[in-house]
Amino acid sequence: RKKRVVNLILYYSFVDINSWSERIIEERRLTHIDYSRIEKAIVYINNNFRDQPSLEEISTAVNMTPFHLQRLFSAWAGVSTKKFLQYVSLRYAKYLLQ
């Protein structure tokens, strides 16, 4: 499960490789990360980015509170759900322009 989330994050190329080791250290400090919910959030954002879902909509889709999702997603990925949504939208716009 963790490997799949890492692959999804790297696919969208928003992870700063230089800070990756720092993120691994931070991840070890966190006692429990629910990778399945992070994966569901990434998939939900990817499937619904055209509608620009809010944090509340994303958190409802993954059965979490908005606060907890934001904290968990930011702690693991290093960016907020909003920023990730922007990356996905920009990637699609870049695709359309090619």
Image: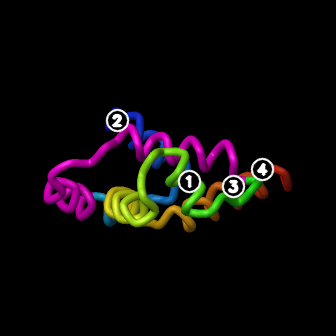
Residue placed at 27% from the left, 60% from the top?
A: 23
Q: Which residue is mark 3?
A: 91
Judge whether residue 3 is colored magenta.
Answer: no
Closer to the eye: label 3 or 1: 1
Q: Which residue is mark 2?
A: 3
Q: Which residue is mark 1?
A: 58
If you read the primary sequence from the N terminus, does the residue marked by circle 4 or circle 1 appear first? 1
Amino acid type, label 2:
Lys
Closer to the eye: label 4 or 1: 1
Image quadrant occupied by the N terminus: top left
Question: Is disc 4 in contact with disc 2, using a CB cutoff of under 8 Å?
Answer: no
Crowding near pointer 3: few (<14 within 10 Å), some, many (20+)?
A: few
- Label 3, label 1: how far apart the Cα atoms are: 19 Å
Closer to the eye: label 1 or 2: 1
Question: Is disc 3 in contact with disc 2, using a CB cutoff of under 8 Å?
Answer: no
Crowding near pointer 2: few (<14 within 10 Å), some, many (20+)?
A: few
Question: Is disc 3 in contact with disc 4, using a CB cutoff of under 8 Å?
Answer: yes
Dominant secondary structure (helix, strand or loop) of the stretch shown in magenta = helix
Residue placed at 62% from the left, 63% from the top?
A: 54
Nearer the observer, 40 or 87: 40
Crowding near pointer 4: few (<14 within 10 Å), some, many (20+)?
A: few
Span highlighted in magenta in the image: 21-49
Q: Secondary structure at mark 3?
A: helix
Q: Secondary structure at mark 1?
A: helix
Q: Which residue is mark 4?
A: 95
- Label 1, label 2: how far apart the Cα atoms are: 22 Å
Quarter occupied by residue 25: bottom left
